[in-house]
Image (spheres, rainbow, N blue to C red):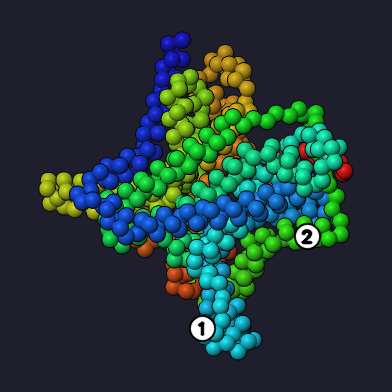
Amino acid sequence: MISSLKISGSWNLFTLTMVILFALPVISLMVTAGSAEENVWEHLLSTVMPGYLGNTFWLMLGVGSGTLLLGVSSGWLISMTEFPGRRVMEWALLLPLAFPGYIIAMVYVELLEYSGPVQSQLRLWFGWNSFQDYWFPPIASVGGAVTVLSLVLYPYVYLLARTAFLQQSAALLEVGRMLGKSLKNSFINVALPLARPAIAIGVSLALMETLADFGTMQLFAVQTFTTGIYNTWFGTYNAPAAAQLSLSLLMFFCFFIFLERYSRRKQRSHTKDSIMNVQPRYPLSGIRAITALVFCLLPVTFGFALPAGLLIQWALESWRNVMLDRFFSDAGNSLVLAGVTAFIGVVLGILLAYGTRLSKRRRVHLAARIVSLGYAIPGPVVALGVLLPFAWFDRTIDAWFKESYGISTGYILSGTVFILIFAYLVRFLALAFGAAESGFGRITPQMEEASRSLGKTNLQTLKQVHVPLMRGSMLAAGLLVFVDVMKELPATLMLQPFNFSTLATRAYGYATEELLKEASLWCLTIVAVGLFPVLFLNRQLRETSPRHYKEI
C-alpha cells in the first residue's frame, strides 16, 4: 500500500511539474506585462486598439455566420437526404481542412488582385483601362478574410453537425413526419435544436481559429490582436506592450471558452441504441437534388478544388525556376521538426493522461485540463511567452560568463531549434493528451488490476498493457501533431533560428514578395500532408456512423 502511494505520488509530481513547465509562457507574459514603465494601454487605446476590436468583431460575426450556414446546411443534406453525388460529397466536404488559411489566402490574392488574371481578363474584355473605370470587390479586406476563413473552417461545423444529425433518434424525426411536418419544418423544429450543442462547439472552434489566425490577416492587411502582437514585437521591440496585447487576447479566449461551455451546461440528449441504427433519409429529385448537389459543390470547389488546381498549374509553369536544393532543405527542416515534436508530444501526452488516470486528486485533473488549453492559445502568444523567459536565461548566463571568465556564450536556447520545438509542444500537446485520454477511456480498469495482481508496476503496466492497446490513438495523436506543426506559421516565424526556414515560412516569404507561383510547390506539399488527417477522419466517421438507412 505504501509503495502504491509512493508511485501514485511520483505520477502526481510528474503531472504537476509538466503543467508548471508548460504554463511558463503565460507566467512570463504576466511578469513582462507588469514590468511596463509607462502606461502602454493609454497609447494602445488611442491608436490601434479600436481598429483591432472593430476588425475582430466583424471577423467573428462574418466567419461565425458563414461557417454556420455552410456547415449546418451541408451536414443536414449529407446525413438526412439522398441525392446523386451524395456519397462523394460526404468526404469531399472535409477536404478544405487540408488548406491552411494563409495558403488559400495566397491563392486568392494572386487570383483576384488588380494585376491578377481575373481583373486583367475583365479589363481586356470590356476595354477598361484602370481601376477607376470599374468596381471590383477588394480581396485584401475584412470581407475577403471572412470569405476565405469561412471556406477553410466550415468543415469544423459540418463534421460535428453531420455526426449529431446521424446520432439523432429516428423515432423523433418520424413523429414529426407523421404530424405533417415538411422536410424544412423537421429540420428547423426537431433536428436543429437537438444538434445545437454540437453545432455550438463547431462554431466555437471556427471562431477560435479565426482569432488565432495570423497569415491570412497579414496577407489581407487586416489588423487584429494576433497581427498586432507580431507587429508590436518586431516593429517596435516593445515587449511589455506585446505582452499586454497577448494577455488581453488570452483572457478573451478564456472568456470565450467559458461562455461556450456555460451556454450548453444543461443541454443533454439521450437516445437508445435500438432506435439509432435506422436513420430516415429523405430522397431528393429534380430541381431539389440539383440544388443540393450544387450547394455542396460550391464550398468544395472554392475551398479546395480551385485553389489546389491553381497551385498545381503554377507549379507546372514554374518548376524550371524552382530551387530544388532550397525546397528539399525546407522540407527536411519541416519533417524533422514535425517528427520530433510528434514523437515527444505523444510520449508526454500518454504519460500525462496515465498520470491523471492513476490520480484521484482533483488538482491533478485540473492541472491536466490547463495543459489542454494550450491549443486554444494563438501562435504569436505562445511564441512571445516562450521567447521572453529563454531570452532572459540566455542573457543571464552570458553576463555571468563575461563577468567570471571574460567570454560570451551567446544564445544557448533562444534562437535554436530547441525553443521552436518547445513552443510547438506548448501549443499542440493538447492534441496528443486528448487522443491519449480518449484511448485510456476505452480500456477497462480491471486490466490494470489484473496486471498489478501479477506483480507489475504502473510503468510496466503502461508499457506492456496500455501502449499495445492504444496504437490507434497514438497514431492519431502523432498524425494530428505532425500535420499541425507542418502548417504552423506565426510561432515559426517568430522563433526560427537564423538562416533556417520551413515549408510554411518559405511559402509565406514568397507570398509577401508577390512570388506566389514560385511558392506553389511549397504550398502543395503542405496541403498534401494536410490531406492525411482528413482521409483518416473520414475513415473513422464511416466506421462509427450508422450503416443502415431507410428512405421515407
Residue displayed at 50% across by 45% down: 342
Give the left or right position of residue 174, taking residue 352 as reference: right
Q: Quadrant of the C terminus?
A: top right
Would residue 432 be seen by someone viewing this image from the given angle? no
Q: Position of residue 487 (x, y in %)?
A: 51, 55
Residue assigned mark 1: 132
The single residue placed furthest to the top in the displayed view is 1
For residue 549, side relative to residue 241 (left or right) = right
- The picture quadrant where one finds residue 435 is top right
Q: How many marks?
A: 2
Image quarter of residue 45: bottom left
Badge 2 marks a residue whose secondary structure is helix
- Element at label 1: helix
Question: Residue 419: percent from the left, percent from the top?
Answer: 36, 48
Tell me which amino acid carries mark 2: Thr
From the top left corner, tell me how far across and down residue 84 is, in percent. 83, 56
* Residue 362 percent location from the top left of the image: 45, 22
Q: In the image, what residue occupies the spot 63% across and 43% down?
A: 199
Numbered disc in front, either 2 or 1: 1
Q: Which image quarter: residue 119?
A: bottom right
Q: Nearer the viewer, residue 235 or 357?
A: 235
Q: Earlier in the sequence, mark 2 or mark 1?
A: 1
Which of these two is toward me, 384 or 446? 384
The residue to which callout 2 is attached is: 291
